[in-house]
Image: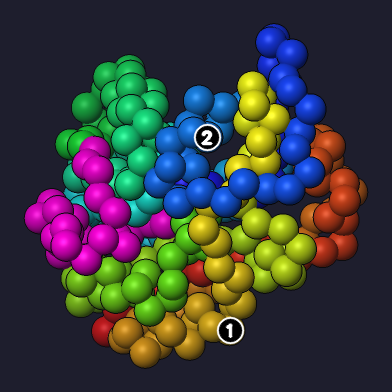
Amino acid sequence: MDPSDSSHPSATTPLEATTEPVYRPTVEAYDQWAAIYDTDGNFLQALDSVMMAQILPKLLDFLPPNPNIVDLGCGTGRTTLNLLRVPGSRLLGLDNSTKMLDIARDRCSRAWDSLSKNQRAATLSFDVWDMLDEKIDMPGAARNADAAVSTLVVEHIPLDVFFGVCSGMVREGGVVLLTNMHSEMGAETQAGFTDPMSGEKVRPTSFVHTVEAVVEEAEKKGFEVVWGPEERRVHEEDFGKLGKRAEKWVGKKVWFGMILKKG
């Protein structure tokens, strides 16, 4: 799961985009988004990848050898592709969208196979799990993790639920790395996409979380900030990396990230 409003140029001429967005349950929306998710010009996703390249080395400083890592809300595996390069780790990707997971499983398995044993995770697995469904238990392999990594996911989850999940997932002394759309951006837009065939502007369920609210709720659940929070604005020099859709956000905060430690 990864946000920011976007559309997709298709070889098949799409219908004119509808004026009013269509709101769908998060799982349904991301299942529909999966086919174009990695190619629809989502600038926040691009920015998150840039920032994660800087943060992941910091995360490794908090991890033991051969760590258990959960990519919580792994989507199509954008972040998983980098995590699977942590040698000796046991890596689990979780998501509530089966269609996003199908893509993640395929691309990450191929990447894992291409690496030598000393360059990759010891194990790589994926599972379907919806943290909002209280009737479904957390997968056993996700418990007692050394780290939970969750990029551009918490926008879709109430904070008390998210950090309750993280508290049950991460061991004492373990860490959570999270990134999200900044509330300055969230006040004007939310995660979503334009379906290239129907022209629908599709929006999943989203919440606007401030940095302060995230930190406050994390502390209630026994976490403390050990890196960040880092907030990121869009600058003109970013256009080459982020694409044209970033232009309207120049000077505005669009992203934040942090690492939190349990206990």
* Quadrant (top left/top right/bottom left/bottom right) for the C terminus: bottom left
Position of 154 relative to 191 (above/below):
below
> Residue 39's quadrant in the figure?
top right
User: In this image, 85 relative to 57: left or right?
Assistant: left
Q: Secondary structure at mark 2?
A: helix
Question: Does 126 sit above or below residue 209?
Answer: above
Q: Amino acid at mark 2?
A: Trp
The residue at which mark 1 appears reads as 212
Say which residue label 2 marks.
33
**Residue range corresponding to the magenta coloring:** 126-150
| 228, 98: nearer the viewer | 98
Residue 198 horizontal/vertical position (percent) = 64, 26
First-in-chain label (2 vs 1): 2
Residue at image location 28% in from the left, 33% down from the top = 120
In the depicted structure, whether residue 29 falls above or below residue 15: below
Mark 2 surroundings: few (<14), some (14-19) or many (≥20) residues within 10 A: many
Residue 127, disc: none
Residue type at mark 1 is Glu
Q: SS at mark 1?
A: helix
Frontmost residue, 239 versus 106: 106
Percent coordinates x, y for residue 208 in the rendering: 60, 70
Find out whether residue 140 is within the magenta segment.
Answer: yes
Q: Are circles 2 and 1 on residues that touch, CB within 8 Å?
A: no
